[in-house]
Amino acid sequence: MSSVLFDRVAHRYDATRGHSEEVAQRMLQQIDQASGGNAQARFLEIGVGTGRFALPLAAQGRQYTGIDVSEKMVEQLVGKLDEVSWQKEELAWGSLPDEESAHHPHISDVQRFLHQESQGRLRIVMADATDLPFTDQSFDALVAVHVFHLIVDWQKALEELLRVVRPGGVLVRCWTENWLEQWKPGLRDVRNRWCQIVQELGGNTDVPGTGDDEVTAWLQQHGLETVQTDVVTWEFQTTPRKIFEGVEQRIWTSTLVVPDDLFATSIQHLRVWVDEHYGDAIDQPYTQQGRMLINVTRIPE
């Protein structure tokens, strides 16, 4: 296993990661347009999770494959398919020409669904991004939404993606600007202070993978240029209490990498600091801005 698992927070993942409908639609449009926006385009998304992007794109008639290593996240996705106009298709792994079975005989957990109205298809495979079970040049569009920070061997994942994309295809990456800065030790807010406490206790909150700038640099080193096609911005309200509860409930990546015993101690320390620092203002709302960068890398013909 070479990435962080979200099994323990899968049941509330969507509620803590949601964007407004307008923001989600702009992201979906950019992903679809980058691929050419046609029903023949073959998509592959790594870290498909609960299907926030896979479901609406496949429902538009796209041919969409999603992989993940978290069984609980995929269960959430399949639960959504049971609620709408999707029909399950029974086909064993290796039935389609892009499914590599000789070196991946262990792939047994594949689920296939057909959207009855649009004829879009969604294939869900339990697989690791660093060892993709697909033949070379199988996909037209690769999708990676806020995922490379989770993957230890992210360079290997990129190599695998470049192997399975066809010449002329695209890699679309979505990443929240300055997201990693929220999880650096400091006193700026509850998250920064928690990271500092963990560090003082001898722990580490660094994510196992990397940020988007490093991915862009790696691609450039391999002769591939990246273009930022859009910046989606939105505002939302939060409170110090909500941020504290998010850390306490371990809904964010950095909280999942800390050992349980050290995490419990860090929360005790953090609770004291929050009470002293915010006092009666703990429920005082304030506005934050989110900025989602959408980057497209085109593979030469």
Image (cartoon, grey):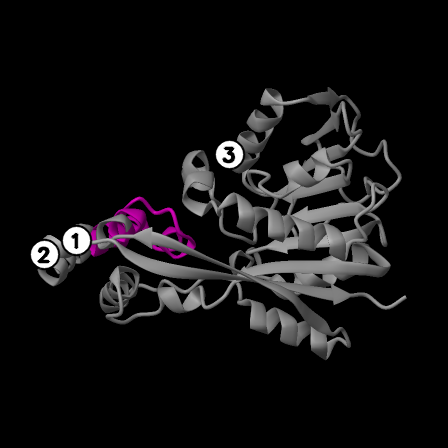
Q: Is residue 126 above or below residue 235?
A: above
Is residue 206 visible from the viewing direction of this image?
A: yes
Residue 1, label in figure: none
> Looking at this view, is 234 or 278 the one in front?
234
- Our reading of the magenta stretch's main secondary structure is helix
**3 or 1: mark nearer the eye:** 1
User: Residue 262 appears in which quarter of the rendering?
Assistant: bottom left
Is residue 106 visible from the viewing direction of this image?
A: no
Answer whether residue 155 is magenta in the image.
no
Q: Is residue 252 above or below residue 82?
A: below
Query: Which residue type does callout 3 highlight?
Result: Lys
Q: Earlier in the sequence, mark 3 or mark 2?
A: 3
Query: Which residue type does callout 1 highlight?
Result: Ile
Q: Secondary structure at mark 2?
A: helix
Q: Secondary structure at mark 1?
A: helix
Percent across and percent down for residue 188 are 26, 69
Q: Are marks 3 and 1 in contact (CB under 8 Å)?
A: no
Q: Which residue position holds label 1?
A: 282
Q: Secondary structure at mark 3?
A: helix
Could you tell whether 269 is left or right of 177 in the image?
left
> Looking at this view, is 61 or 49 the one in front?
61
Q: Which residue position holds label 3?
A: 72
Q: Which residue position holds label 2?
A: 279
Q: Decide: few, some or many residues near mark 1? Use Cα within 10 Å; few <14, some 14-19, many ≥20.
A: some
The quadrant of the rendering that contains the C terminus is bottom right
Percent across and percent down for residue 156 are 67, 62
Q: Which segment is the magenta one?
A: 243-268
Real-space CA distance between mark 3 and mark 2, rounded to the nearest whole angstrom: 37 Å
What residue is drawn where x is 76% and y is 42%?
104
What residue is drawn where x is 32% and y is 58%?
287
> Looking at this view, is 31 or 154 the one in front?
31
